[in-house]
Amino acid sequence: MADLETREIEYFVAVAEELHFGRAAERLSIAQPALSKAVQRLESRLGVQLLTRSSRRVSLTPAGQALLHHGRHALNAVSAAAEGARRAGAPEAHLRLVIKPGGDANLLSGILAAYARRPGAGRVDVLFGGATDRADHVRDGRADLALLYTPFDDLTGLDHRTLFLEGRVAILPRGHRLAGREELRMADLAGETLPRWKGVPESGDGVIGGSGPEIADVAQMTQLIMLGRTIAVLPRSSVEPVHPGLVYKPVADAPPSRMVVAWSRLDQRPLVASFVDAAVSASRSRPDPATHQDSGAVG
């Protein structure tokens, strides 16, 4: 069995993500011919073709797709190991929590207050991630914990505890055929164009990973909905503040969404366990999300 070096995996992942040797070489700060030869050597050692190359495009073979998937996790594991060693040697105990801006469902202040009251509580640094990369912050060691939504966020390699379960709302332009309804069902959305969130695979639940335009954040989503190019279905707690040009309708039978606090399965520090317990305790005193959201989310 061929052993892979971290640098080889890093080179291949860059090419696989960019699907362009020139851009990947620039990203890695190496010469393009050297990168091309490194990938060729990797294919030779593994005995499989990883990439299909033509004069116009580069694409992944099934073997390349498998190596990209596992390679990303391998690089995250190496980064997390190094970061874990640095944390273990740090004299001051503190935690880093990553959230999406506005994506804490008004829980964050209560969680931080509950944790601060616990014996041995350390400082908590709050980091802000994007719509789809917060789990990666935990996997590669940039953060210790994250507030995530399932099934939207990928929890591979993470442990988690549920903070609350909530329904979802459809976000529509005001002139949409369904905008006058009080409540929707999944069947009402059949044939509608749903966006593809960058980095999020299809979930099979009918409301995540659609076939419409690719988006990376809520600002892009909002603009495309207002233009009539797509609609979206999101957890109730993630639609505040509501946009005046859009309407928000409960989808009664949409699969529920869970907001969770997540951390690496390899991180067994008491400091992390204490924060998780505080987060779960604080979430129990949160007002019912449905009651809190319905008045403002439906327009």
Image (spheres, rainbow, N blue to C red):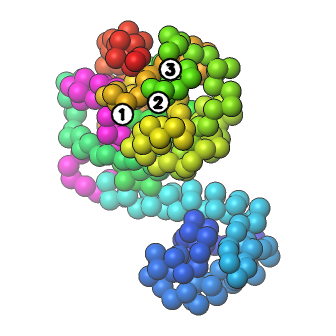
Query: Which residue is at the front of the view, 277 or 32?
Result: 32
Residue 12, given in percent of the width and then of the height, sits at 60, 72
Label number found at residue 103: 1
> Could you tell whether 107 is left or right of 151 in the image?
left
> Could you tell whether 9 is left or right of 141 in the image?
right
Amino acid found under the numbered disc labelled 1: Gly
Across the whole image, how many numbered discs are drawn on residues? 3
Amino acid found under the numbered disc labelled 2: Pro
Question: Does the CB distance between marks 3 and 2 fall below 8 Å?
Answer: yes
Between marks 1 and 3 in the image, the one whose residue lies nearer the viewer: 3
Residue 253, given in percent of the width and then of the height, sits at 61, 15
Residue picked out by circle 3? 179
Label number found at residue 206: none
Q: Measure how far apart labels 3 and 2 are at the Cα level.
A: 7 Å
Residue 98 in view in this figure: yes
Residue picked out by circle 2? 173
Range shown magenta: 88-113
Residue at the location (44% across, 37% down)?
Answer: 226
Q: Measure how far apart labels 2 and 1 are at the Cα level.
A: 22 Å
Q: Is residue 251 magenta?
A: no
Query: Which residue is at the front of the view, 257 or 186?
Result: 186
**Please, is residue 209 above or below residue 119 in the view?**
below
Location of residue 11 (image quadrant): bottom right
Question: Does the CB distance between marks 2 and 1 fall below 8 Å?
Answer: no
> Could you tell whether 24 is left or right of 111 in the image?
right
